[in-house]
Amino acid sequence: MSRFTTLGVGGEAEVWTVASHAQLREAMSAPYRILGGGSNLVVADEGLSERVIRLGGEFAQSELEADPALGTPEQPVTGWVGGGVPLPGLLRKLQKMGLSSLEGTVGIPAQLGGAIWMNAGTRFGEAFDGLHSLEIVSPEGRLVVTPTELPWSYRSSGIPRNHIVTRARLKLRRSTPEAVQERMDAADTARRGQPKNRTPGCAFKNPTLPGGERLGAGKLIDEAGLKGARIGHAMISPEHANFIVNLGGASAADVHALLSLIRDRVGIELELEYELWP
Ligand SMILES: Cc1cc2nc3c(=O)[nH]c(=O)nc-3n(C[C@H](O)[C@H](O)[C@H](O)COP(=O)(O)OP(=O)(O)OC[C@H]3O[C@@H](n4cnc5c(N)ncnc54)[C@H](O)[C@@H]3O)c2cc1C
């Protein structure tokens, strides 16, 4: 699994890359997990007993150019994009076409399906900003829903685990490539100071005190003197303390040990941001 995660750790698993609904149904006939860009995961060194499903083929394609009536003022632009399409490439394409609404998610190395499932975002925008409707496949079958039918909220779509976002119909506004680029640059600038090493993103959510005050997890870890702390080949980033990075050859055990160290040293209970598989 180290090949399929941005952190680059994880043991063996049976990975099924599916290209069609027929293959997806077959893959879902035994216990499974659905993998996106692997940008929010720490997979155990021992590997996984369940099948891992990756979206390829028709799920990794988009049909954005298909509609000739794109983006007239009366009609917002829509188009289907596969859940397995990498978000960074999609944003580049939309920027070139001068289509706006998802640019607040710039810099998130997810697939569209994974970004929607988590409602990934930044303070400049989130995945649900650009959604018209979604195709979801579950063991019960296939359905199309609109965001109003989902209990989505901050960093959550409300879609049950292992219900697979196979396609999304985007709702995009006609803009210009320059204006979209400008908004992407603004969101990107806010990321300065984030490490460039392999990482699964932020380790912990920002905790909220009983009185409602929100604290920065990175600041708490920094104040505990842990910037640059290293176990094995994993390190708490000296640039941003809420990032654990793989220096090359790290194991999941190294990352778990750093997470425990942080929890021991920071006096406040911290909730993990990424998922531990299994
Ligand atoms: C450098 C870096 C920066 C990041 N910055 C941000 C940020 O600014 N904001 C933010 O919100 N997150 C950020 N993240 C975290 C991460 O990118 C998001 O959580 C993202 O939504 C994960 O998507 P993914 O496709 O990589 O999913 P994965 O990591 O592969 O999986 C995460 C979860 O989504 C589920 N999933 C994946 N694909 C699907 C699908 N098609 N259908 C249903 N479920 C699916 C998986 O089963 C799993 O439960 C960052 C990560 C990194 C490495």
Image: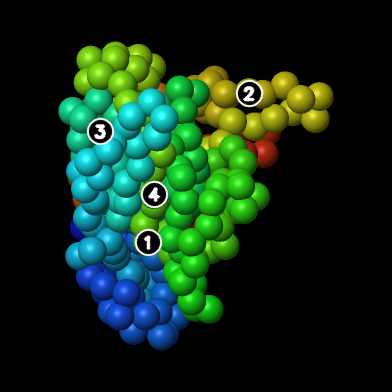
Q: Describe residue 45's horizontal placement relative to residue 154 as left or right.
A: left
Give the amino acid at mark 4.
Arg
According to the picture, the residue beneath numbered tag 4 turns out to be 169
Task: Indicate if the residue with disc 1 has its beta carbon within 8 Å of ligand 1.
Answer: yes
In 3D space, how far apart are the residues under numbered discs 1 and 3 (Cα atoms)?
20 Å
Q: Nearer the viewer, mark 4 or mark 1?
A: 4
x and y, in percent, of residue 106 in the image: 33, 30
Task: Indicate if the residue with disc 3 has its beta carbon within 8 Å of ligand 1.
Answer: no
Give the amino acid at mark 3.
Leu
Give the amino acid at mark 1.
Thr
Contact (Cβ within 8 Å) of mark 2 with mark 3: no
Q: Residue at x 20, y 35 (%)?
A: 93
In 3D space, how far apart are the residues under numbered discs 4 and 2 (Cα atoms)?
36 Å
Tell me which label, 2 or 3, sits earlier in the chain.
3
x and y, in percent, of residue 17 in the image: 24, 70
x and y, in percent, of residue 131 in the image: 45, 43
Q: Which mark is residue 215?
A: 2
Quarter of the image where the N terminus is located: bottom left
Task: Indicate if the residue with disc 2 has its beta carbon within 8 Å of ligand 1.
Answer: no
According to the picture, the residue beneath numbered tag 1 turns out to be 166
In the image shown, does 32 or 85 lie closer to the viewer? 85
* Residue 179, image quadrant: top left
In 3D space, how far apart are the residues under numbered discs 4 and 1 (Cα atoms)?
10 Å
Tell me which label, 3 or 4, sits earlier in the chain.
3
According to the picture, the residue beneath numbered tag 3 turns out to be 94
In 3D space, how far apart are the residues under numbered discs 2 and 1 (Cα atoms)?
36 Å
In the image shown, does 111 or 202 lie closer to the viewer? 111
Q: Tag 1: Cα neighbours inside 10 Å, few (<14), some, or many (≥20)?
A: many
SS under mark 3: helix
Q: Nearer the viewer, mark 4 or mark 2?
A: 4
Contact (Cβ within 8 Å) of mark 3 with mark 4: no
